[in-house]
Image (tube, rainbow, N blue to C red):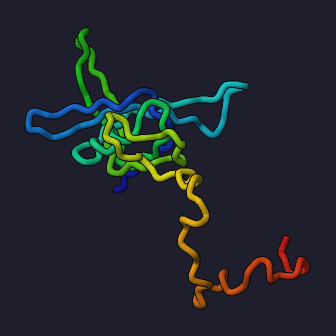
Amino acid sequence: MLNHITIMGRLTKDPELRTTQSNVSVCSFTVACERDFSQGNDKITDFIECVAWRQGAEFVRNYFSKGSMIIVEGRLQSRKWVDRDNNNRTSWEIAVDHSYFGEAARRDDRAPMGTGVPSRVDASEFDNIAPGQMKPLTGPDKNNPFTQQSIDDLDDGELPF
């Protein structure tokens, strides 16, 4: 049998990190996923509850916040419970196995909670490096067919576009 689900969406609020009595980290969060189709002018959005455990829980809490795009892989699970009016209820959630960044980093995007660690590397952080500070290239890699010839060496008639 197969129970595997992958979703991509934005967090509706900051993830909530808790610790069980046996000192295991658990993080709950909700992901808003837009469907590929709409009803009239309105997009249809599903709000999917997720729960991550241990290091996965700490990763989500440290590197994601409200509005962050996240990709979640896991399995769909149900929880049965009884409400205040003694009615049987069922809740569905994703038990997270893996979570990934779903978008490129923004320049000011840093890990929350004052960890001082960038949540992702942003190439624009290297914009202020002076040319004299850069390490020169050692030349083309003879094993890589894409570096065999410089673009300047090509005749315009040879370009594929």
Q: Position of residue 23 (x, y in %)?
A: 11, 38
The quadrant of the rendering that contains the N terminus is bottom left
Q: Position of residue 153 (x, y in %)?
A: 80, 83
**Quarter of image, res 66:** top left
Residue lying furthest bottom in this view? Answer: 142
Instruction: Please report the residue visible at 27 percent of the width from the left and 20 percent of the height from the top.
Output: 88
- In the rendered image, the vertical position of residue 71 relative to residue 145, given as above or below: above
Q: Nearer the viewer, residue 72 or 59?
A: 59
- In the rendered image, the vertical position of residue 62 relative to residue 129, given as above or below: above
Residue lying furthest front in this view? Answer: 132
Residue lying furthest right in this view? Answer: 157
Q: Position of residue 49 (x, y in %)?
A: 38, 32
The quadrant of the rendering that contains the C terminus is bottom right
Residue lying furthest left in this view? Answer: 22
Instruction: Indicate left or right for 148 with 90 as reference.
Output: right
Determine if residue 85 is in view.
Answer: yes
- In the rendered image, the vertical position of residue 110 relative to residue 156, given as above or below: above
Instruction: Please report the residue visible at 55 percent of the width from the left and 30 percent of the height from the top.
Output: 45
Instruction: Please report the residue visible at 39 percent of the width from the left and 51 percent of the height from the top.
Output: 4
Instruction: Indicate left or right for 159 with 95 as reference.
Output: right
**Quarter of image, res 141:** bottom right
Q: Nearer the viewer, residue 152 or 78?
A: 152
Q: How many marks?
A: 0
Determine if residue 6 is in view.
Answer: no
Instruction: Please report the residue visible at 66 percent of the width from the left and 81 percent of the height from the top.
Output: 146
- In the rendered image, the vertical position of residue 32 relative to residue 72, given as above or below: above
Q: Position of residue 102 (x, y in %)?
A: 50, 47
